[in-house]
Image (cartoon, rainbow, N blue to C red):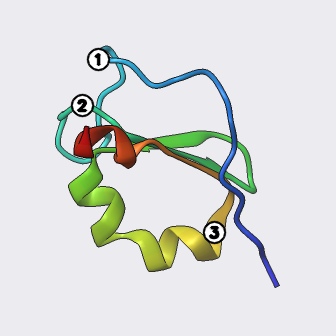
Amino acid sequence: MVSTTVIEGAALNAADRCDRCGAQAYMRVTLSGGGELLFCAHHGKEHADRLKQVALKIQDETDRLAR
């Protein structure tokens, strides 16, 4: 069983862009095999189920959008 963890890392900023569409990233996914992916809130939510299966860590800052 792979568990995902919300981590406190370096905050994502406007220079961090979604790997899927280029919008501002609000999620950083660290993969168990190494490397990371960045996602906007839309694509992070769209792919959440699969990401939880392959992620070592997930840094989710989508709550910043509700402010």
**Amino acid type, mark 1:** Ala
Q: Mark 1 = which residue?
A: 14
| Label 3 vs label 1, nearer the camera | 1
Q: Quadrant of residue 23?
A: top left
Say what secondary structure mark 1 lies in: loop
Coordinates of residue 5 in the picture (x, y in percent): 72, 58
User: Looking at the image, which is closer to me, 65 or 27?
Assistant: 65
Q: Residue furthest right?
A: 1
Determine whether, in the image, residue 20 is placed left or right of residue 3.
Answer: left
Q: Reading the chain from its start, which is encountered first: label 3 or label 1?
A: 1
Tag 1 and tag 2, C-beta contact below 8 Å: yes
Determine whether, in the image, residue 4 is placed left or right of residue 58.
Answer: right
**Amino acid type, mark 3:** Val
Say what secondary structure mark 2 lies in: loop
Q: Reading the chain from its start, which is encountered first: label 1 or label 2?
A: 1
Q: Which disc number belongs to residue 24?
A: 2
Q: Mark 3 = which residue?
A: 54
**Amino acid type, mark 2:** Gln
